[in-house]
Image (tube, rainbow, N blue to C red):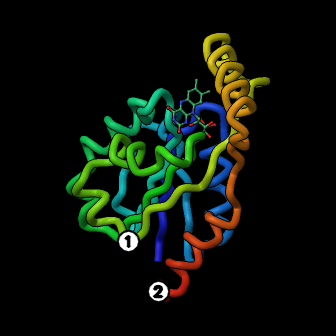
Amino acid sequence: MNTLIVFCTTYGTTEEAAKRLSEMLAGNVKLVNLMKEKDISLEWADRVILGTSIYMGQPPKQLKAFIKSHESELLNKSLGLYLCSGVVADYEKNLENAYTQPLIQHAEKCSYFGGALKPEKMRFMHKNITKIMVKASEKDGIPLPKLEVSAIEKFARYFIEKGY
Ligand SMILES: Cc1cc2nc3c(=O)[nH]c(=O)nc-3n(C[C@H](O)[C@H](O)[C@H](O)COP(=O)(O)O)c2cc1C
């Protein structure tokens, strides 16, 4: 079984999730960072896992472009989808913004892997928005997002238990 994990990240959290997942899955696993690589071939893959972060309710444009040009191929492979984002309550809405309905319907497993805010890495605007988000979370007593390793393990276990 050859698995390609194709991900979009801005500050590395979705990449960290992809790396952790790659260490948990059985068979051959390769990673593709959509922010860096173009001309991606899916030919090698029996299974594709797509992962993205969310900014202002949307995934990066690179993910949208990738899905537009590869959707029919993705619908012919084993498929898993995940999100790294900050607001767990918005998971369903974010999933629908990130992926198309046919992909969501076709996916064997969709999951929320948590997220992380890394202000030390952020450009100015994102840093300011993060400050506002952190203050709002503190005020409402909502914990800040963190990468949910147990959710990644559960996702990996699903595919391992399928025996492929
Ligand atoms: C400027 C900014 C906007 C964000 N907007 C959203 C959002 O609309 N919904 C959400 O659930 N998370 C949002 N997040 C949280 C990110 O999706 C989360 O931090 C994610 O883990 C980032 O992953 P990355 O490091 O792979 O880019 C936002 C974060 C920042 C910094």
Which residue is nearer to you in this view: 100 or 140? 140
Q: Position of residue 10 (x, y in %)?
A: 59, 31
On the image, the x and y values in percent for residue 46 come to 38, 71
Query: Where does the image place residue 110, in percent across and percent down from the top left?
Result: 44, 62
Ligand 1 quadrant assignment: top right
Q: Which residue is mark 1?
A: 108
The amino acid pointed to by label 2 is: Lys
The residue lying at 25 percent from left, 62 percent from top is 75
Q: Is residue 163 left or right of residue 107?
A: right
Measure the alpha-carbon separation of dots 2 and 1. Answer: 10 Å
Determine which quarter of the picture holds residue 106.
bottom left
Q: Which residue is more in the foreground, 142 or 6?
A: 142
Q: Residue at x 42, y 43 (%)?
A: 94
Q: In front: 144, or 112? A: 144
- Residues at marks 2 and 1 touching, judged by CB atoms closer than 8 Å: yes
Image height of 103 relative to 100, above or below? below
Q: Local crowd at mark 1 within 10 Å, few (<14), some, or many (≥20)?
A: few
Residue shown at the point (62%, 65%) measured from the top left: 151
163 lies left or right of 62 = right
In the current view of this chain or complex, which residue is farthest to the right?
Answer: 120
Label 1 secondary element: loop
Under mark 1, the amino acid is: Glu
Identify residue for label 2: 162
